[in-house]
Amino acid sequence: MAVQGGYTILIIPLGTALSNLHALRFFLWMKQMQQLERERDALLQGLEMVNQVRDWLQCHLLEAQKRQKHMGAQAVSQDGRPFCLPRLWWVIRHKRGIASRAPIKNT
């Protein structure tokens, strides 16, 4: 995470203080600039966090894809049927058998 820098306070004597219109405008302008700097710093910090999260997600996605590919290579038996799906094969065959014996309802 980035080190946050400090802010510099600038004191400029402007005649009779804030009752002077030019002094008031300058003060408001400086205040707005300070707010914009803080907003910029917060956005940059957020962007850095988003980049870190993106990198973390990309790394884990690649690991998951490698595991998935590795499991896919191991999951085929000699006859070509998947090892990891025997229960699903059984359910499909069983449902087909039940569906073929089910009576047809007339409504």
Image (cartoon, rainbow, N blue to C red):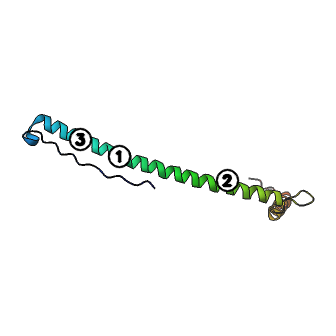
The residue tagged 1 is 39
Residue 30 location in percent, x, y?
A: 23, 41
In the rendered structure, are the residues bearing label 3 and label 2 in contact, judged by CB atoms less than 8 Å apart?
no
Which one is in front, 53 or 102? 53
| Label total for image | 3
The residue tagged 3 is 30
Q: CA distance from mark 1 to mark 3?
A: 14 Å
Residue 43 lies left or right of residue 20; in this view the side is right
Query: Mark 1 or mark 3, which is nearer to you?
Result: 3
Check the image and name the residue furthest to the top.
22
Please rate how many residues cluster around mark 1, counting C-alpha atoms within 10 Å: few if below 14, some from 14 to 19, many from 20. few
Note whether residue 56 is visible: yes
Amino acid at dot 3? Met
The residue tagged 2 is 62
Please rate how many residues cluster around mark 3, counting C-alpha atoms within 10 Å: few if below 14, some from 14 to 19, many from 20. few
Residue 62 lies left or right of residue 75; in this view the side is left
Query: Mark 3 or mark 2, which is nearer to you?
Result: 3
Residue 31 location in percent, x, y?
A: 23, 43
Check the image and name the residue furthest to the left.
16
